[in-house]
Amino acid sequence: MRAVIVPAFGPVETVQVGDWPDPVPGPGEILLKVEAVAANFVDTLVIGGTYQFLPPLPFVPGKGPVGVVLALGAGVTGLAPGDRILAMAEIGGYAEKAIAPADQCYRLPDGLGFVEAAAMSLAYDTAWFALHERGRLAEGETVLVLGATGAVGFAAMQLARAAGAQVIAGVSSMDKADQVRAGGASDVIDLGAPNLRDSLRDQVHAVTGKHGADVVIDMLGGDIFDAALRAMAWSGRLVVVGFAAGRIPSVKANYLLVKNIEVSGLQISDYRKRKPALVRRCFDEVFALYAAGRIQPPPSRRFPLADAAAGLSALLDRRVRDRIVLLPGA
C-alpha cells in the first residue's frame, strides 16, 4: 500500500511517500481502509521527534483516520466489515490502510461524510474533554477560547455554544473576527492589542459585565496564558491544551488561592487508554449534536496523500485557514 513514511525524525518536508507493507489486524484490532485523515499539529511534533510518545523508526504517522472496516482481528465484536468508522489510532493513519484498537473505533452517523468526520477527528474529542471533563462547564457560564481559529478552538466554540455558554473567542487580529463569529463566538477579543497583560482582562470584563471567564481553554500558552489568568472569574477553571505560542508558562500558586481558580492540563491520549468508556460517551454526544444540527464540522481543504508534506507545511505556516485533510485515494 501507499503511505507517508518517516525514516528519521525531522522537519515535515522530509517525510516520504512510498510503499509500505499492508498491516494485519491482531487480536482486538480492526483493519481500516482509510478514506480521509486530518493533518494535526500533534502529528508534526511526532514527525519532528518532540512529542512525549514517539514510535520506533521508521513509521507511518497520522492520528484518527476515518474510513471503512475491511477486516477484524480475533475477538472483535460489535463491528463488521463495511462499517463506516472514525478510528482513534495513535499512528498509521497517513496510509491507504491502517490498524486501530476496536474499542477505540466509533461508527459515523448517517449523513456525516468521511472528509467532514476526519476534520472533526482529534479536535472535537479534545475540545469536549477540555470543556466538560477538565473545565466542568455549566450552562450559562462564560468560556474564553484562546487559539480560536485552530481546529480545537473551532470545536470548543461549537461545543460550548451547544452547551448554552457565552463564547468569547481570542484572535491574534480582529480581521479574523468574522471567521470566529461564524464558528460560534458571541464575542471576540483582540490578543494583539497593546499591553496584553491588562488589555485581555479589560476586554473580557467588558463583554461579561466584569464577571470574567468561568472557563478558559488555552492552546497557546506564553504571555497569553499569563494574561488570561487575570481575566478569570472567581472559581474559574483554565485548561491547558497546548503551547502553540512557544513558551511553556508557569503560575504562582498564591494567585490560584486568592481567586479560588484552578489550572489543569489535558492529554487526550491518556483518556483513551485509561477511560475508554468516557471517550465513547464523548463521541456519542458529539455525533448526536451533529445529527441534531447543533454543531457542524469545520471547513476543510483537501490534499492527496502524495502531497502530505505540502499539507503539513501549510498547517505549520498557517497559509490555510481551513482544516487540512489528506485523501489516500486521491
Image: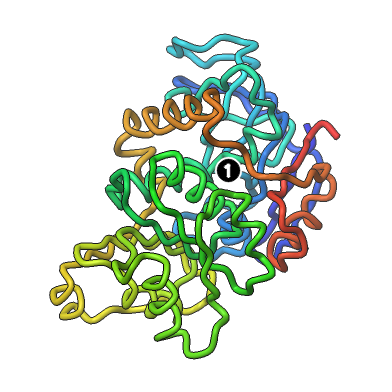
Q: Quadrant of residue 129?
A: top left
Can you say which quadrant of the picture contains the C terminus? Answer: top right
Residue 142 placed where, x, y %? 36, 56
Q: Quadrant of the N terminus?
A: top right
**Residue 267 location, x and y as percent?**
39, 53
**Side of 216 where 114 appears, left or right:** right
Residue occupying the far front of the picture: 209
In the rendered structure, the answer to whether residue 202 lies left or right of residue 172 reads left
Q: Residue at x 53, y 54 (%)?
A: 185
Query: Seen in the image, is 132 located left or right of residue 9?
Result: left
Is 24 in front, or is 118? Answer: 118
Q: Residue at x 40, y 79 (%)?
A: 202
User: Which quarter of the picture shows residue 12?
Assistant: bottom right
Name the residue type under label 1.
Answer: Lys
Q: Is residue 289 visible?
A: yes
- The residue beneath circle 1 is 63
